[in-house]
Image: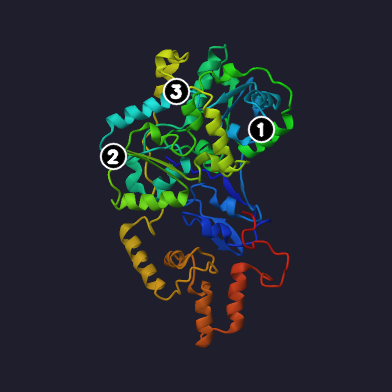
Amino acid sequence: MTAIKTYHALKVDEQKCIGCTHCMKVCPTEAIRLRNGLASIQEVRCVDCGQCMRACPEKAIYVEQDDIDQIKQFKYRVVLFPSIMIGQFPEKYTEDQIYSALLKIGFTHVFEVEQPVGFLKDSIKEYCRKEKKHKPHISTFCPAVVRLIKIRYPSLVDHLIQRKSPHDLGAHFAIEQLKKQGATEKEIGLFYVTPCSAKIASVKSPVGEKESIVDGILNMNAIYNRVMKAIDDQEAPDSTKQRQNLTRDGILWSLTRGESKHFGERSMAIDGIHNVIRFLERLENEEVPEIDFLELRACDQSCAGGILMTGNRFLTVERLERRAKRYSPSWKFKDSPIQADAEKIKEKLIADKIQPKPVFMLDDNRSRALEKMNKAQRIICFLPGIDCGACGAPNCQALAEDMAQGKAKMSDCIFLQQLWQEEGKIKATKAFKNVEKKWGKDRFQADCNKRGRRNEGF
């Protein structure tokens, strides 16, 4: 059976890339190398966190997304979006106006995916009660973190909670609601508006399920711009009924501690992928005291800091917290108008067991991997340890590993080349040609308009 290739939403536009190394230096999984003066993403290591896209001053790294025109194929065109999207809009626009504008751009139905989050909350609590062997239980809300654990911390895979994300929950909920109105599943098109690239990847090649129920995934930034063109200051029709199941818990779910606060005192919330990595290192080395639940998010301020968000993340959080105060804290199944759908939806929330796929080993064969590791350690003795990135790798250790795998040469290090010139082992012309081969011809000519200066693009 052929393994399904993992989809990646982040792509490099070679026409725009200037080889500035910004992306390579911020990548948390060392997935980027510079080849011929251009950034190249190693797909096996990429978790689609989007740090590279945020750091690029040339906008050479972009997100591949579905075309919104494909919604026309369906009779019932459902837009699914997280509550975080509402926090993007200026306060002068009401929820009704935003909902109305989404209908104007072509959708027939509007659903905030966290409406039935009570089902997910109870389902996770049930899982945590039954599964006591692998603690802490780690949330699977953030797909970038799930992929990170799968490839870099395979020993922690059993700690991942076998439950799907809110967008899957919202999709099933929307289908059940539309079926009651006489729609058939073939007539319903479900389109999720995402705040990040990791969720695009999780829909295109999901982890924990064979395929996603969502038909298409749309860039939140692009949808925001379309809505802003369609929205107006006139009073919009009342859309309260479309949010009748939305609660304070649901609105805050995508924010930091929006999830962990529901699962006991011994729970933690960590945002920012570099913070997550540092904590997972400690957890894997058993340096963390006993914890029951971990909420790990790749972006600073969680989804409010997603790379496809338009507004300032701190203002978005503040708007959502104020919005949440207008809603009841949560609803109970017995009082909910969707109680009849509870069991049906909760069954579909259970994810398949996630399998580890370690890619940070130097070789699949254990003995060869040990040989390469020893070789890399010997090589590192000769490298300067400056971690300048001029070799096209993020640091000297990464270069040594690349060399051990036959993907790089000692001459890639410009400092070694300088040493060899001093010792007469290589001519200056040859050394310069080596550098040109790595970074491109005419790269070192004076150019006062070159991009990539301090803080440019951030």
Q: Look at label 3 and name its amino acid.
A: Ser
Q: Percent position (x, y) of residue 363? A: 38, 58
Instruction: Tell me the quarter of the image containing the N terminus.
Output: top left
Residue at the location (61% across, 76% down)? Answer: 433
**Residue occupied by mark 1:** 68
Q: Look at label 2 and name its amino acid.
A: His
Q: Percent position (x, y) of residue 449? A: 73, 64
Identify the disc placed on residue 330.
Answer: 3
The front one of 211 and 329 is: 329
In this rendering, the count of numbered labels is 3
Residue at the location (53% across, 37% down)? Answer: 204
Observer able to see residue 438: yes
| Residue at the extreme left | 133
Q: What element carries label 3?
A: loop
Distance Cα–Cα, label 1 vs label 3: 33 Å
The image quarter containing residue 77 is top right
Q: Answer above or below: position of 283 versus 215.
A: below
Residue at the location (68% across, 61% down)? Answer: 451
Observer able to see residue 217: no
Q: Is mark 1 on a helix, strand or loop?
A: helix
The first of marks 1 and 3 along the sequence is 1
Residue at the location (58% across, 54% down)? Answer: 55
Distance Cα–Cα, label 2 vs label 1: 42 Å
The image quarter containing residue 294 is top left
**Residue occupied by mark 2:** 134
Q: Answer above or below: position of 1 versus 114.
A: below
